[in-house]
Image (cartoon, rainbow, N blue to C red):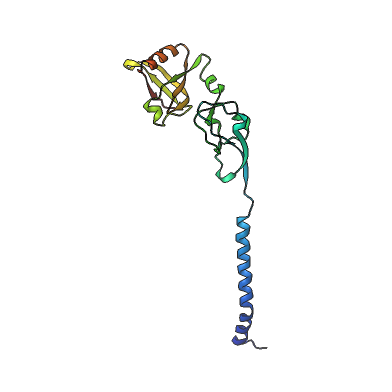
Amino acid sequence: MVITSWSLDRRWQRIRRPLAVLLIGVGALLLWSREHAPIATLPTVVATADVAVGDVVGPDDVEVVAWPAESRPPPAAADPATITGRRAASAIRAGEPLTDQRVIGPSLLATAGPDSVAVSLPADPLSASGLVRPGDRVDVIGGRGAVLVSGAPVLTVSQETGTVLAVPASVAPNVVSAAGADAIALVLAQA
């Protein structure tokens, strides 16, 4: 039997449309399965309500949700116990994934030293700039350029209420006095 080009053309014409329909169907199935594939998630603690700076984060303020793994911030908490009962270091918005850096607790002041106390300073240009963050260390400069405290850890920062630092109890009265006289400045120390 001799196969001519005419017979090949005829066979090709008969299977061309069913083959095209089959390939389109396979492509559509692949696209559909890609869009409906299960997304890998990780448990993530998120805020259920806005929490103001300095407020204690309660159990009703957080919940654990399944967060898409590819967009989850690496330091996000998975256990609400690491967040609840601690104070917000800065404003927290509802729906925001939470990290242990967004809250402070007694452990932050305790790491500053056994004789440390928390001192509140009024808002100043450095803290208002956004460069100072909780956990940073600052030098406190009093009137006439005297260094009152060197390397004081920052506990909280708020553009409205100011900065809270951990300072040795022995120099706290001097820092408070200088802050009251509006003769104080913060210098961001290198880590």
Decide if residue 140 is in sight here.
Answer: yes
Residue at the limit of the structure toward the left, as seen here: 144
Tally of numbered discs: 0
Q: In this view, does 25 lie above or below 170?
A: below
Residue depicted at x 62% and y 71% = 21
Q: Where is residue 126 in the image (x, y as percent from the top left)?
A: 38, 27
Q: Is residue 128 above or below residue 16?
A: above
Residue depicted at x 59% and y 86% = 5
Task: Specify the quadrant that holds the C terminus.
Answer: top left
Q: In this view, does 114 lie above or below 9?
A: above
Q: In which quarter of the image is residue 42?
A: top right
In front of the other: 189 or 86 = 86
Task: Specify the quadrant that holds the N terminus.
Answer: bottom right
Q: Position of residue 25 (x, y in %)?
A: 63, 67
Residue depicted at x 63% and y 73% = 19
In front of the other: 120 or 75 = 120
Q: Viewed as shown, does residue 27 lie left or right of 133?
A: right
Residue depicted at x 51% and y 19% = 112
Q: Viewed as shown, does residue 41 lie left or right of 185?
A: right
Q: In which quarter of the image is residue 184?
A: top left
Q: Position of residue 124 (x, y in %)?
A: 38, 25
Residue at the limit of the structure toward the right, as seen here: 1
Q: Where is residue 46 in the image (x, y as percent from the top left)?
A: 58, 37
